Structures are given as C-alpha cells and as structure tokens.
Image: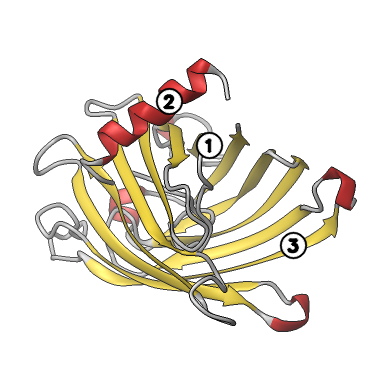
Amino acid sequence: MSRSCWFAVVLAVLIGGAAGATPTTMVWTPCSIDMQAFRVVHLTYDTYTTLGRKGPARGGEAFATDLGLTVGVLPFDAWQMEVGVDWLEPADDPLYFNAKFGAPEGKLFGGAPALQVGVFNAGTKKGVTDQNVADFVTGRSLPAGLGRIHLGGYLGNPRVLRSSAGAKANSGVMAAYDIGFWPAPAAAGGFNRIVIGADWLSGRNAIGGGAVAVNWCFASNASVLAGPVWFNDAGINGHWKWTTQLDANF
C-alpha cells in the first residue's frame, strides 16, 4: 500500500472514535451486510438530483454532493470493522463520521447470518447535523443464488430526527435486497458485473425513504450505481431524486 493510503488509514482510525455519516450502504440506506476488509480504502462520490424539473424556480432540487472515505481497520477474519468520514458540499456544516463493526456471514458458526452494529450521520453541528444514528443489521444469502436479504433497525437523536411537522421520528426499521448477475471470469476476480439492489428505511424524517438501483461493476474494485430514490417526508427532502454513485477500492 502506498504512503498516501497508509495515511488515509491512520487518519480514519483517529477520527473514527467520534463515530457516524454513510458507512457501506445498499443505495440510500446503510442496510447492507457488506463491510470494507482490512486495509481496503473505499472512496465514493454520490449525487442526488431531480430529473425533468428544470431550475430551482420550477421545482428542480439537488442534495449536497457526498465525498466519502471508508477504511477497513481490523485484521481479523471473524470480526471486521470499518470507519469513515464524509464531506458534503455545498453545506454549512459538511463534516460527518461513521463506523460499523460485526461478523460477516458464516463466520461465527456454520450458516450464521451476518451481524453488525454501527453508527452513521454523526455530524458536527449540535442540534442541526448530529443525527447520531445507531443501527443494527443482520442478513444472509438466499439459497440457489437468489440474492441476499438484509434487515435492521435504527435509533437516532430525537432532537434532530423529526418530521417536517415537528413530530419526533428518531427510530424505525430498514430492509434491503440485492442480487448479482453476469459473473466475471475467476481469473478476473469472479465478481458479479451487474448487481440490482433495493432498500427502504421507515420514519418520516430526513433519512426515511427507499431506492432501487443498478450497479455496474466495470472492474473488481470500481463501479457506478444509478437509480431513483424516494422519501417518506417530502416536506424535508422534496421530490424523488435520481442518484448516481461512483465507488472505488484501493
């Protein structure tokens, strides 16, 4: 690993103690049993924008662009951990943190589901961006190559996670499903070149909503994902949006 990558690992470990932003996700939610392996540095570039609504005066909207870095930090097989940092622009308070810890599928005992606990969207502005959402995720592969199912729940800061009407909405459940197609040759890594994923998170708050997307893995360590995202509370997040997400591992 290069010196710059080692610096990224050290930086992530140091700031990871503060916990929480977007850890490894499915599309819109962190309801995924995937985690970054030890020493893997994951970079992401996520955008969300409306389609066909022209400019802001005619209903056009966009979220701040998310520039994220997530790093696997535990050198164990049965237990893994990732920590991350996200920078959102444009935003008044752009810095967020996240972390995830758990056991991958089949590691605790034969046939064991994956088990994870984590925290995400830990912002730096008290009472504004500090959603500080703790979550639990479990899941496993379905038989006969029928994809994977992911289930979880979350609990966040009640002062921040509220509906557009002001009601407390800081807890809920989440679910996701993904399935891969068109495997690459074993010599190239054997990864699925096309993955279809869908996820949903309950709650009329800033994080409640769902998505469906297609992920094209054009290399074993790089992919582009795209699809629609809708929201449980349009008073907070506005109209549905199209997300495009670029991801790379080093």
Label 1 amino acid? Answer: His
Label 3 amino acid? Answer: Gly
Viewer-proximal residue, 209 or 218? Answer: 218
Vertically, is 55 above or below 231?
A: above
* Circle nearer the viewer, 3 or 2: 2
**Mark 3 in CB contact with mark 1 (< 8 angstroms):** no
Position of residue 203 measured from the top left corner of the image (x, y, whole percent) = 30, 68
- Residue 67 figure quarter: top left
- Sequence order check, earlier mark of 1 and 2: 2
Residue, disc 3: 180
Q: Residue furthest front?
A: 76
* Circle nearer the viewer, 3 or 1: 1
Looking at the rendered structure, the secondary structure element under dot 2 is helix
- Sequence order check, earlier mark of 3 and 2: 2
Position of residue 138 measured from the top left corner of the image (x, y, whole percent) = 45, 73
In-image side of 184 versus 137 (left or right): right
Q: Residue furthest top?
A: 3
Residue, disc 1: 42
Q: Residue at x 21, y 51 (%)?
A: 132
- What is the C-alpha distance between the residues marked 3 and 2? 30 Å
Q: Residue at x 47, y 62 (%)?
A: 210
Residue, disc 2: 8
The residue carrying pointer 3 sits among few (fewer than 14), some (14 to 19) or many (20 or more) residues within 10 Å by Cα, namely some
